[in-house]
Image (tube, rainbow, N blue to C red):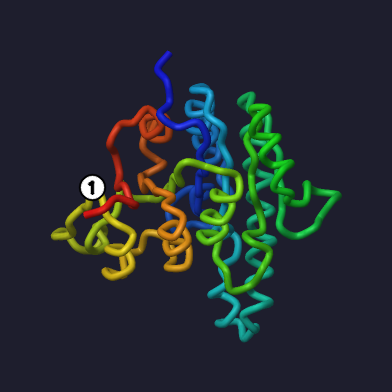
Amino acid sequence: MSKSVYKRVLLKLGGESLAAQEGGFGIDVGAIKSLAQEVLAGKNLGVQMGIVIGGGNIFRGATASTLGMERVTGDYMGMLSTIINALALQHALEDVGIQTRVQTAIEIPQVAETYIRRRAIRHLEKGRAVIFAAGTGNPYFTTDTAASLRAMEIGAEVIFKATKVDGVYSADPMKNENAVKFSQLSYLEVLKKGLKVMDSTSVSLCMDNKLPMIIFNVREKNSIKRVLLGEKIGTLVGVES
């Protein structure tokens, strides 16, 4: 069996990865089963994997403002959405034989463990996938920032940002046929160009701590496994230009 080039990774999933289509809402059985198989292919390489998941398929913080809610309330509703997604993903992963633990930044002991760094690392060392829910537990911070934070706390070697496109482009490739794909970028290039990789806070955290990111399309067959094996797909962020 081929060997992964990484020992411990943090996989960042958008909530939409659980929906039937990009931009869709709710949880689709086919989508979540497919995602579980992708994670399984990666876990079978012996990789320790933490997962941060978003909640955009259920509720977006931006929706709160359109409903006249204050930002803080909307952000907490978004955190609860990520917990719903985490529990759904946990079931799908355990269905394919992956032992998991869900840890949340908001205390809900009847549902999941409260996030404790040392306990999370112990779970990873025992071969369990750890799903981190509720973002950082604070309003005004996205799940992208939570992914960067958790990755550094658990000592991950890289962040895998799973998206709907096969890398980072100069413009939206769905709307602009002249969009150019970048094979690699420095952190500063992402910030200066305003590229929609992850939010600026999360990119800055990664830059300060020299944590690389790889952005790729998780809906492509065996994408997680291919990245773990060192195949150069997607876009690598964190190299000097």
Q: Is residue 67 left or right of residue 119?
A: left
Name the residue located 50 percent from the left edge and 59 percent from the top edge: 144
* Residue nearer the viewer, 9 or 84: 9
Is 171 situated above or below 39? below
Viewer-nearest residue: 152 or 184: 152
Quarter of the figure that contains the C terminus:
bottom left
In-image side of 183 versus 86 (left or right): left
**Residue 214 percent location from the top left of the image:** 37, 46
Query: In the image, what residue type sits under mark 1?
Result: Ser
Q: Which residue lies furthest to the top in this view?
A: 1
Q: Which residue is drawn at 48% across and 61% down?
A: 205
- The image quadrant where one finds the N terminus is top left
Q: Which residue is at a point 36% across and 30% down the rendered structure image?
A: 226
| Residue most extreme to the right | 110
Disc 1 target residue: 183
Q: Is residue 222 above or below residue 23?
A: above
Image spot of residue 174 (x, y percent): 26, 58
Crowding near the residue tagged with mark 1, few <14, some 14–19, many ≥20 C-alpha atoms within 10 Å: some
Judging depth in this view, the residue of 136 and 83 nearest the camera is 136
Q: Residue extending furthest left?
A: 178
Q: Position of residue 207 (x, y in %)?
A: 41, 59
* Residue beneath the point at 33% across and 52% down: 237
